[in-house]
Amino acid sequence: MGKKIGIGLLGLGTVGAGVANIIQNPNGRNPLVAEIELVRVAVRDINRPRAASISSSLLTQNPLEVVDDPSVDVVVEVMGGIEPARTLIKRAIAAGKSVVTANKAVIARHGEEISAAANAAGVYVLIEAAVGGGIPIIEPLKQSLGGNKINKVSGIINGTTNFILSRITKEGASYSDVLKEAQKLGYAESDPAADVEGFDAADKIAILSGLAFGGPINRESIPVQGISGLNNLDVDYAKKLGYGVKLLAVAERLEKQNIDLKSIPLAVWVQPTLVPEDHPLAGVNGVNNAILVEGDPIGKVMFYGPGAGAGPTASAVVADILNIAGIRTIETTTNHLDPLLAANRWRNCHVVEPSDIIQKHYLRLRTEDSPGVIGRIGSVFGSNGVSIQSIVQFDSNEAGAEIVVITHEVKKGQITSSLNSIKTLAGVKGLSAEMVCI
Ligand code: NAP
Ligand code: HSE
């Protein structure tokens, strides 16, 4: 491999620091991570304490020094806002540099002009981190689902509001207290109105619709209602009726039959929504996001994971950088295979002994229904270092009782030694069933 790929970071806040931490700690990751190098970093205030340790010689308060630096091959824009982000992205493209950005606000409004400029310059603008935090959804929509006719994309795509709604539902927490917590955790936008008024989710559904349905979406035409006007009482009532309240973003193709239409009609909206408790989106809580894609012929596929925060978002940013690094590698090696697509091996692996596998175990024991049996069983597990999640007695009658034990995560070897002793205990007739739990 020749010269490392120089990364210029615009921003070293929540996401920027997460990206820097990955680049500076390549061990254990794909070897391409070691081929990228931070060469310049722009911040607003050079003296602010940072969550990543960066040599002060890399820092500048002038973002042009990042974009124009000849050692910067890829510009990573994680500063946020519309300007100067848009101008800086376009300047990087004009200089022939690929761009990675997490900035959904700028892409939802200026994505068309930015893509046109990138296509004309023959560079990439990759945006995996702009929607769904750490969830891979942009590249799957562009690549893995390309054979489908997409009919609907819906989901929970703002981590801050899902964090707030989950806490209100679970513990009746105060809206403003939980919002402050989300800000402290780095989930919220610099102006959190973008989150709670639904604007951020609208930016994201505009981006997803553009990819899913293949045409530009006018962000300003999307109706948006956020959660700032929601009352905890409504969450309680919804709960009593068997629903959870989620801020949903939905984009649906209305004309499913006529594929020759010049323009496909789409219903696109963002609104607080009652979701039946048994719906897959109802179980998406905290900062997690989930995106349900419905297509022909795939049917329904759901993408789920952490929707905001330093680590998850940086994971998506670095994935985009690696895609660009992979393409650079094709140009500089002889085999002309994309290392991220080819079946590469860069380390040895081995399978551990079954006794070393750590799992939660489900054990059903046949016992006599007599005093002290559960205590004796519990003591044996304790002496083997097995912590018990639950122990419940079922079906007690003259024939005996069934005792079901669910353990916390332990090595299989600890279970085997425990069972060897338990089978010899007074009152224990035998093991009826053994399974594992997740
Ligand atoms: P942040 O913590 O506020 O960080 C922004 C960074 O950009 C700061 O380092 C700031 O410098 C720098 N900056 C801002 N304006 C600048 C300017 N004009 N010149 C030089 N530096 C400037 O924001 P963030 O949470 O990391 O978010 C960054 C972007 O990622 C946003 O577009 C956001 O929507 C997106 N995003 C965030 C998340 C998340 O979970 N936070 C997830 C997905 C996408 P100072 O530090 O000196 O103020
Ligand atoms: N503020 C955004 C959210 C960050 O809470 O989802 C991730 O895009």
Image (cartoon, rainbow, N blue to C red):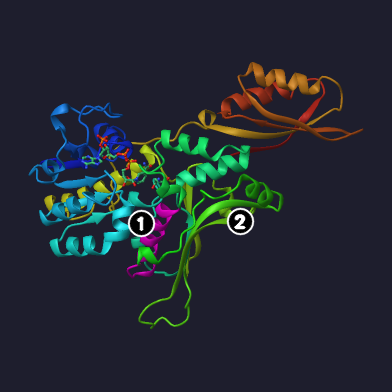
Is the residue indicated by label 2 positioned so its CB lies within 8 Å of ligand 2?
Answer: no
| Amino acid identity at mark 2 | Leu
Q: Residues within 10 Å of mark 1 (few under 14, many from 20)?
A: many
Nearest to viewer (mark 2 / mark 1): 2
Taking depth in this image into account, of 171 and 130 the one nearest to the observer is: 171
Location of mark 1 (residue)? 138
Q: Residue at x 14, y 53 (%)?
A: 91
Query: Of helix, strand and loop, which mostly describes the magenta segment?
Result: helix
Whether residue 144 appears in this view of the structure is no
Please say whether residue 111 is one of the residues in the magenta stretch: no
Q: Residue furthest front?
A: 229
- Decide: few, some or many residues near mark 2? Use Cα within 10 Å; few <14, some 14-19, many ≥20: some
Residue drawn at x 73%, y 22% as measured from the top left: 377
The span shown in magenta is: 198-217
Callout 2: SS: strand
Disc sitting over residue 274 in the figure? 2
Where does residue 342 sit, x and y in percent of width and height?
A: 27, 53
Residue 233 point in image, percent of width and height: 65, 46
Q: Looking at the rendering, in which quadrant would you find the C terminus? A: top right
For the point 52% across and 50% down, the residue is: 227
Quarter occupied by the N terminus: top left
Q: Are marks 2 and 1 in contact (CB under 8 Å)?
A: no
N-terminal label among 2 and 1: 1
Q: Position of residue 165 (x, y in %)?
A: 55, 45
Left or right: residue 317 compared with residue 331:
right
Residue 114: percent from left, percent from top:
22, 60
Left or right, 342 with respect to 369, comes to: left
Which is nearer the eye, 140 or 268? Answer: 268
Q: Residue furthest top?
A: 383
Judge whether residue 349 can be spotted in this image: yes
